[in-house]
Image (cartoon, rainbow, N blue to C red):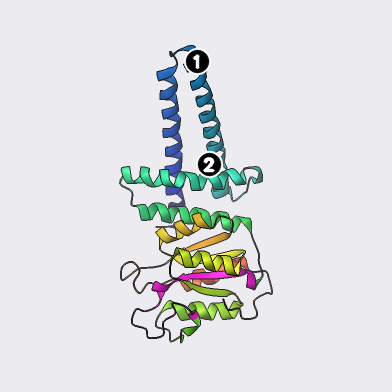
Amino acid sequence: MAHDEKKRLFIGLIIVALMVAAFVAGVIWYLFRTSSKLGQWLWFVGILLLVGFLAYAAAGIFSLLVALVTGRNISILSNAREKVAFAFLPLALRLGTLLGVDKERIRASFIEVNNQLVRQRQLRVHPQELLILAPLCLQKAKCPHKVTHDIRQCRCCGGCSVGGLLELADKYGVHVAIATGGTKARQLLHDLKPKAVIAIACERDLVSGLEDSRGITVRGIPNRRPNGPCFNTLVDLERVEEALKAYLLPNEKRGLSKP
């Protein structure tokens, strides 16, 4: 599925979710408009709060649409845009399930939306401030040189994508590490304190990681799973290098950093 199509799926679902919420608010108002005076005031306050939320959500979605369609950032709505995107993700997943849309497609759409917003920030960092975070399943299952605790155990034989990531890390002087799960990933982020992350994982783990690291700029790259989930997966190294070039400050591509 093309990147633009992926982004349209997520945006479309959260717009529908917003419309459903507005419809529910209208039904509630209709059902309780003839209640007692106290009840009317209580529901008026409730409806007012709900309308405020819907207005905030609409502003965030509008900012998302402007950012994705025109590439422009409405700075005053940046906070609303990101909060709305994450807040509406569970609704988009549930709505997509009801409509028969695969959850992985929705998550992939959300990741593409996140990546475009990250690109529009135009954040530039020093090599030591950038981390490539990869899953253990990129390593061949039968490889005797396990990189579970130290990615530098890899012999760069070319049998899997781990060696390619190490070569890119050495070429650009950035950190690279293997995360065996969410706890390990959070520990690495805490220890290294990167300003930017290139995260590689399946769509589900990427979305979970984006939600856990909202204070850090993260660009997600889904892995490829020709052998099924969590087993001998692959990653597009060209996409990783493209993300590295987009993140790094000009003329700062030297050195070697080890996590």
The residue where tag 2 is placed is 61
Tell me the crowding category of disc 2: few under 14, some 14 to 19, or many 20 or more residues within 10 angstroms, Cα based.
Answer: many
Residue 242 in sight from this viewpoint: no
Tell me the crowding category of disc 1: few under 14, some 14 to 19, or many 20 or more residues within 10 angstroms, Cα based.
Answer: few
Q: CA distance from mark 1 to mark 2?
A: 34 Å
Segment tinted magenta in the rendering: 128-151
Q: Amino acid at mark 2?
A: Ile
In this view, 21 is above or below 13? above
Relative placement, left or right, of 232 versus 84 is left
Q: Mark 1 vs mark 2: which is more N-terminal?
A: 1
- Identify the residue at the far right of this view: 251
Q: Amino acid at mark 1?
A: Leu
Circle 1 or circle 2, nearest the eye = 1
The residue where tag 1 is placed is 38
Q: Residue 256: give x, y in percent of width and height.
A: 61, 81
In reply to whether residue 136 is colored magenta, the answer given is yes
Relative placement, left or right, of 69 versus 145 is right
Residue at 41%, 79% in the rendered image:
160
Residue 9 in sight from this viewpoint: yes
Residue nearer the viewer, 17 or 179 = 179
Residue 151: give its label: none
Q: Residue 64: give x, y in percent of width and height.
A: 54, 45
